[in-house]
Structures are given as C-alpha cells and as structure tokens.
Image (cartoon, rainbow, N blue to C red):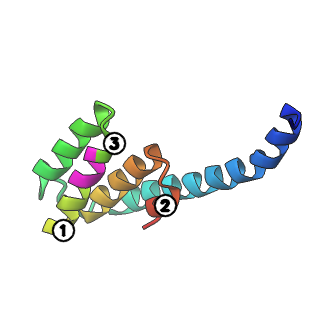
Amino acid sequence: SMPMFTTLEAVLPMVLRRFAVSTLAVSKCWHDMVVLASVIDVARHPAWRARGNGAFKSGAFAAAERLYSAGLAAGGDDAVLLRCNRALARLNLSLFREALE
C-alpha cells in the first residue's frame, strides 16, 4: 500500500486546479453582477430566481441549477444573475467546468 503522503502528493495538484477554476467562476460572476446590477431590472423573472434561491438555501443544489437554467431559457433581462446563481449551484455540485458556461 502507498503511504498517505504519496497519495496526497498525487491528488494535491488536481485539487488546486479545481480550486482555481472555482475561484475564476465566482470572480467572473461577481464582476458581471456588479457591472450590470445598475442596468438590469432584477424583478423581470423573479419566480425562477426566487425558486432557485429557495432551493439553493435549502441545499438542493441540483434543483436550484435546474430552476436557474429554466429561468435562462425563459429569457429576460436578469440573465446575468441567473447565470451567476447557476454557476454557484454548479460549483456546489462539483461541476467545475460547467460552472464556467
């Protein structure tokens, strides 16, 4: 059997790459929200976002991701908020690459 230290040494680079991808996704979403918050009507599609937020707060990240995606499919001016919320839900599901979409 391999010593624990060797196993950790092999896994650490992968964990660090995933962390970097996660940090980039959150940073991009935050930037987009700050830049566009003064321009968009955040009440345009409140039902999808509110339902997604409720699912997210209760820890139902897969449901939240589906609700945010449905809100995006419905269209509206709050696409940035829905995308950012969906990215955070995907990060909580360890869907790191999908969070960047």
The vertical placement of 12 against 87, above or below, is: above
Q: Amino acid at mark 2?
A: Lys
The numbered mark, 2 or 1, whose residue comes first in the sequence reads 2
Q: Nearer the viewer, residue 63 or 87?
A: 63
Mark 2 → mark 1, Cα distance in angstroms:
21 Å
Q: Position of residue 101 (x, y in %)?
A: 42, 67
Residue designated by label 1? 73
The vertical placement of 101 against 66, above or below, is: below
Q: Nearer the viewer, mark 3 or mark 2?
A: 3
Q: Secondary structure at mark 3?
A: helix
- Residues at circles 1 and 3 in contact by the CB criterion of under 8 Å: no
Q: Residues within 10 Å of mark 3 (few under 14, many from 20)?
A: many
The residue depicted at 33 percent of the width and 42 percent of the height is 61
Q: Nearer the viewer, mark 2 or mark 1?
A: 1
Q: Is residue 10 visible?
A: yes
The residue depicted at 15 percent of the width and 51 percent of the height is 48
Q: Amino acid at mark 1?
A: Ala
Image-based side of 66 in relation to 2, left or right: left
Q: Amino acid at mark 3?
A: Phe
Would residue 78 be counted in the magenta stretch? no
Q: Which residues are magenta?
A: 63-67
Residue designated by label 3? 61
